[in-house]
Image (cartoon, rainbow, N blue to C red):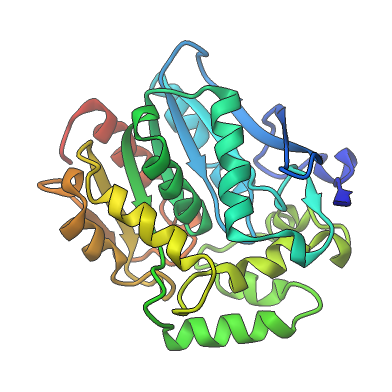
Amino acid sequence: MKIMRTPEECFANLPGYDFEPHYVEIHDDDGTPIRIHHVDEGPQDAAPILLMHGNPTWAYLYRNMIPGLVDAGHRVIAVDLIGCGRSDKPATRDDYTLARHYDWMSKWLTTMDLRDVTLFCQDWGGTIGLYLVATFPERFSRVVASNTGLPLGEGESEFMKMWVGMMREADAFPWDMFAQGMSANLSEDEIAAYRAPFPSAEYEAGILRFPLLIAVQPDNPGAPLNRAAWEKLKKFDKPFLTIFGALDPVSRGWDKRAQADIPGAKEQNHEMIDHANHFIQEDAPEILVEKINAFIGGAHS
């Protein structure tokens, strides 16, 4: 498997982002070494908050949340999924499968040996993160799921049909559409920072492939994996909170399903943020920090 690695100079002088990079190497089952990047801030002996992003973003998405979580005394880890951010990028679209993403991040989690984890996950970070929770429930103390879900092969929304169909034919990622989908008023430099991991289209195989891996179609090869994980999540009785954006067209309704089916979601103060779109970390970072800190502290606010 050929690996692309974004040059370090692409990440110089990004606005609002001055976190030191950390790297862990795992191996694909074919033997290929793959380097995974994460931010690691705050006291190393504190219980970790694991922040997981989606497509096409990376740890930069959490730049406005990390300081407030660290100030509350937490260790904060923001990982870049493979194919994204400062993590390595397998070069061809066929290199990426849902099973591989699950395996890669399972290897990362166990190599890091993270325990007593509070997971905050959004978009693909939620799909992959929830699979990790289902597979390694002993490593997680609580979960905050935001604008995400675990697709079970039950059919596509009109939005998803459009998105998957468009991306199946795309030769390069539609960054203009990404910028238009941001409710937050981002500067050109901030949009450029999101694009920094992808100096050319040849680095974009992973983010182009992600939409086709969303297991919404009944015959999607990822659907059985997700259904098996969902059955395990139905037994997850540790605290499970949903914080969704009312304007998000991607994962609408999954919060209600989680609240109904996951035991740990019972009697939690679930939140719907009226002004937040899909990239809720940009639209409501202060609210998210407040809610996460309170949730860890055992408060219901």
Looking at the picture, how far across and down is residue 154, in whole percent?
Answer: 37, 78
The residue shown at (88%, 63%) is: 202
Indicate left or right for 263 with 198 as reference: left
| Residue 285 showing in the rendered view | no
Q: Write the residue at 64% across / 34% down.
A: 38
Q: Nearer the viewer, residue 79 or 292?
A: 79
Left-right relation of 114 to 267: right
The single residue placed furthest to the top in the displayed view is 45
Q: Using the rendered view, name the quadrant where residue 62 is placed.
A: top right
Image quadrant in which you'd find residue 112: top right
Picture coordinates of residue 294, whole percent (x, y): 25, 33
Q: Residue at x 82, y 63 (%)?
A: 92
Q: Indicate whether 84 appears above or below 20.
A: below
Q: Where is residue 85 drawn, in percent x and y?
A: 71, 48
Q: Is 273 rendered above or below residue 3?
A: below
In which quadrant of the rendered view does residue 103 lie? top right
Q: Give the residue drawn at x 85%, y 67%.
A: 201
Q: Residue furthest left?
A: 267
Above or below residue 266? Residue 170 is below
Horizontally, is 253 left or right of 2 in the view?
Answer: left
Residue 216 visible in the shown view: yes
